Image: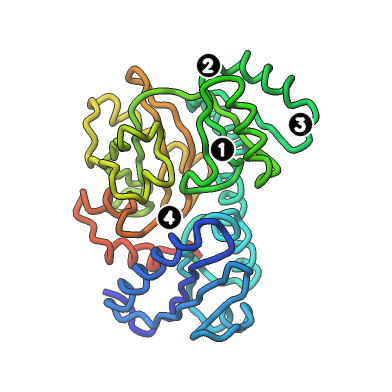
Amino acid sequence: MGVSNKRVTVLRGGPSSEYEVSLKTGKNVIKSLEERDYNVVDVIITKNGEWLYQGVVRNPEQLLLTTDVVFNALHGEFGEDGEVQRLLERYKVPYTGSRSLPAAIAFNKHLTKETLKQHGVKMPQHRVVTVADVPNIDAVVQSIVAALGPSYIVKPLANGSSVGVSMAKDELTLKDSILGALQDNDYLMVEEFVTGREATCAVLNNFRDEKTYVFPVIEIIPPPEELFFTTKAKYGGDTREICPGNFSYQERAELADVAAHVHEVLGLSQYSRSDFIIKNGTPYFLEVNTLPGLTAESLFPKAAAAVGLSFTDLVTHLVDSIER
């Protein structure tokens, strides 16, 4: 049961493209904490970075120095990239999720891959493209085609919920995708498009006497018209999510091992969720989410429910097991 005198400040909203998802995550977290009699402070960070409490703009310091712990229900930039974590560390406020440096590395897809490839994690090949490459875009595209062909995924270097991700099937659409995405991002990652079955695997620290507990693997089957797990597929309600997924024992074991390995190698805290493509029985790691969504459509709560961990118990576990 919750500790009724523990004051928990829930941060939600934020300046990222995942503002609406964060509002939903935070709303669910608040409901669960109130059910367990925590003293909850609901702080909404606006899209332009103002901190609102009870509809009034407040100084972050004023809110943070009067709380026991912070539940970080933000997603995307500021909430997941190490920024808010650095702020909380400055004020010495315990908070849920990963520390600032691991969060920043995990949020950057290129840094994540560069870190993990030293530890034998199998991943699609990729190239980084920046705005500085635009004057030489034709040569850049040709080198990518030669190295990664024939199909590609273009994604922002740091973003979540598949925001800004597109697929390119040839050299011309690859060039168009890169130039279009560089209008909103200074850095991109072009990844070889690995075809196969999609999966995600969640882990939770210090649960059921295990330091890194791995939940059953979820198989993701987007609607036929979606070639990958797009933002629309994630939140549109038409994607089938099977937990536990219909994978072989060996595939499930390997996915679980890699998800736990990624979590530990990157130095993540409390919880994370890793995404994969399984091609011919081999898992390819795509990316890791250090603050998985906690909405009605979210995958992490579904994985927890598969082993009998209720949403409310998950939330209170995160609050009560914060690494101080």
The label shown at residue 155 is: 1
The residue to which callout 3 is attached is 133
Circle count: 4
Q: Earlier in the sequence, mark 2 or mark 3?
A: 3
Q: Secondary structure at mark 4?
A: loop
Q: Earlier in the sequence, mark 4 or mark 3?
A: 3
Label 1: how many Cα within 10 Å (few below 14, some 14–19, many 20+): many
Q: Earlier in the sequence, mark 3 or mark 1?
A: 3
In the rendering, at what x and y percent does residue 137 appear?
Answer: 73, 26
Q: Secondary structure at mark 1?
A: strand
Q: Is residue 304 above or below residue 189?
A: below
The residue to which callout 4 is attached is 270
Label 2: how many Cα within 10 Å (few below 14, some 14–19, many 20+): some
The N terminus sits in image quarter: bottom left
Q: Is residue 11 above or below residue 267?
A: below
Say if mark 4 contacts mark 3, CB within 8 Å: no
The residue to which callout 2 is attached is 150
In the rendering, at what x and y percent does residue 318 appear?
Answer: 38, 63
Query: Which corner quadrant of the image does residue 136 belong to?
Result: top right
In the rendering, at what x and y percent does residue 159 appear?
Answer: 55, 47
Q: CA distance from mark 4 to mark 2?
A: 38 Å
Q: Amino acid at mark 4?
A: Gln
Label 4: how many Cα within 10 Å (few below 14, some 14–19, many 20+): many
Q: CA distance from mark 4 to mark 1?
A: 27 Å
